[in-house]
Structure formats: structure tokens, C-alpha cells
Amino acid sequence: MSMQPNEIRSPFAERPMLVFWETTKACLLACRHCRATAQPSPLPGQLDTDEGMRLLARIRAFGDPAPVVVFTGGDLLLRDDIFDLIAEASRLGLHVAAAPAATPLLDSPMLRRLKDAGVQSVSLSLDAPGAVHDGIRGVPGTYDLTLAATRAALAVGLKVQINTVVMRSTVGTLPEIAALMLREGVPIWEVFFLIVTGRAGADDALTPEEQDDVCHFLVDTSRYDLLVRTVEAPFVRRVLREREAGKEGGALHQRLRADLERLAGPPQSPVRMGLRGTLDGDGILFVAHDGTISPGGFLPLELGNVRHDDLVSVYRDHPLLQQIRRREFLGHCGTCDYRGVCGGSRARAYASFGDPFASDPACPVAVAASLQ
């Protein structure tokens, strides 16, 4: 299935699937792996209400199908104008998602207000059971607050997505989190593979072989009628193709799968995982609190600023994004048979080598090729 570079055609060339707006840096948590290095108060230069309204109009200008706008942070609930902004996004016809922090602010009435304002889905972070999760998030009691918020969001009719970060302290409890989601009726699991940036340290990351094994486990988990997605692990789609060809993972995969079957029984459904996904800059666009445009939240390369650059033009025409969408990469990621469906994490390549076009050091295939 070899492909030539000119054969790569992105379905997201004209518009992204997701636009993340970091509405504020302010947050009451202190997560160990925080990309935003969030803090209790907003930073100077945050987009004001009028600037936020103009940003939403430009997101809608991408046309149909309109991108999903994800209100994130920091903690979006620490903006006084957040409900006006959400209502405007809804009025414009955007699908509105929210990624609030699990703090005492996020109670059942607040979730009802978010839904009434126009939020259709919420994502909540649940990394591991109890004290491990609280240790990662930096505030005792966060696990209990997250579980309560999950139940409250489902009760008011919001679609709920659970986000889980894969790191040394959480990998062994992934089956417990998956089983918990199945019991609670959460339909979507988004699993984030750590980028060593912000507050995250190198000791938190798994080896490439371990990350591949986690991908094998996620393929298995998607057979429990659970929609499973990954962030910064596009190589899961290589693993998915390999599984279709009969390949299995290693010891970590076998252990995680056995734990899940012990907790949830054997899988009963077909695999629910897409064969084509997004990359930073290819289906994804990120707008920081001060209007800076970048390919993704973990790829902090400044492409422009919404205060003086047109968001639509930046996404469609910026040379860096066009190169990402053409999959013109260095090393193995530039020649891999799977680059059309994978492409490697551009954020991890940049964090590791200072080059967004380098090969992804978390992919064992790319690592092996670099040693030859």
C-alpha cells in the first residue's frame, strides 16, 4: 500500500473539524501535565467579549459542515461572559462543546446553564481512580467532583466524553476507567498520549513499545460499544490495520485486555474506531487566550493572531499547515506506508526535536527505522 507524496489528499483542506478556543488561562486546578500552565487568574491580553464574538463569526465562515468549536482553557467557567459567548456560537449554528475543569463550580445547576446556553457536549478529565487522579490534578477531591459532574451532565442530557491521559502512573488503571465508563453510560473515551511539555516530565512518558501496546488495548476497548479516540497518537490507525491483519500486541497489551475482560466481560461489538483521523493543523486548529493561532494546543507554533489575521485564510493557506496536510515529513514519517492515515504526532516531534516535521519518537516503527 505504498503511497507517493502527491497522492496524499486531506479531507480537511478547506475547513477544520475542530477549533479549540482557549478562552482563558485561569484555572483552579494544577494538573501535572498541563499544556497551558494554567493559573488562578487570567493573563493580560485575553480576548475580550467583542473579540470573542468576532472569532466565533470567523469560525462559522469556514462554511458547511461547520467546525465544532470547543470552549476550553484553563477553565472556561472563570470567564464572566462565557454564557453570552456560548449563546452566540449556538446562534451562529456551530456545534458547541465545552471542556470545563472539575471544580466546585461545575455542579448540576451549572451544567444545566451550559446546556440551556447551547452546549451540546462536555468533556471531563478522568485519569485514574481516586487518589491517583487527584495527585495528577493537584487538588484533593477532584476525582469525586469529576464523577459527580459526569453523572449530572448525563442527567441533564449532555453528551459526555471522558478524557484520560496515558502516563506512567495511569497506564495500569486504564481498564478500570474503561469499565467505569461502561457502567456510567459514557459513550465516548478520548485517550491522550502524553506530550512532554508544560508541566509534564520525561519520566511520565511510556516507551514506544508500551504506547503501541496501549493502542492495541484501545482497539479492544472500542469493541465494547464505546467510541474510542486518541489524541497525539495517530499511530493507533497503523495498529488498527495491523490488528485487521492478525497482529497482536505485547505483554502490556495482554495484561490490560485481561483486566478489562475481568471487569467488563468479553467484548460483544465490532471495533468502533475510525481509519482516518485528524492531526494538529489537519482538521484541528487552536486559538490561544490572546488570539494566537497555532496548529494545536500542544504544537505552539504561531501562525498568526485573530486580532489582525483572518482565521479562515490562515488555516487554508499557511505553508506549514499545507505541508502537514500533504504529509511532507522527515525520516520514517515521510516515507511510511501509513502516513496517509497516521502521519505521527507533530506536537511530539516538535517537543522532542524542535521540528514539527520530524518523525514521531513514540512510534516504535519510526524509532526502529531511525536506528537502521
Image (cartoon, rainbow, N blue to C red):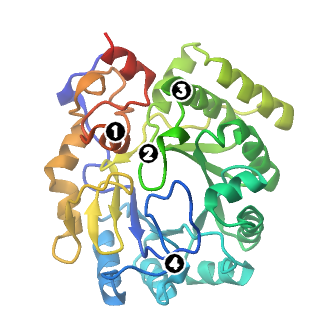
Q: Give the structural element (helix, strand or loop) at label 1.
A: helix
Mark earlier in primary sequence (4, 1): 4
Real-space Cα distance between discs 1 and 3? 18 Å
Q: Which mark is residue 40?
A: 4
Q: Secondary structure at mark 2?
A: loop
Q: How far apart are the two marked residues, 3 and 4, measured between alpha carbons? A: 36 Å
Assign the C terminus to one quadrant of the image.
Answer: top left
Mark 1 crowd level (few <14, some 14–19, many ≥20, 10 Å Cα) = some
Quarter containing the N terminus: top left
Judged by depth in the image, the label closer to the viewer, 3 or 4, is 4
| In-image side of 108 versus 24 (left or right) | right
Residue to which mark 2 is pinned: 196
Q: Is residue 316 above or below residue 363?
A: below
Which one is nearer the viewer's eye here, 170 or 155?
170
Disc 2 and disc 4: Cα gap in Å? 23 Å
Residue 342 is left or right of residue 191, and the answer is left
Residue found at x 33% / y 14%:
371
Q: Which mark is residue 352?
A: 1
**Contact (Cβ within 8 Å) of mark 2 with mark 1:** yes
Regarding mark 3 in the picture, which secondary structure is present there? helix
Amino acid type of the residue tagged 3 in the rendering: Asp
Q: Residue beneath label 3, please?
A: 212
* Front: mark 2 or 3: 2
Q: Amino acid at mark 2?
A: Val
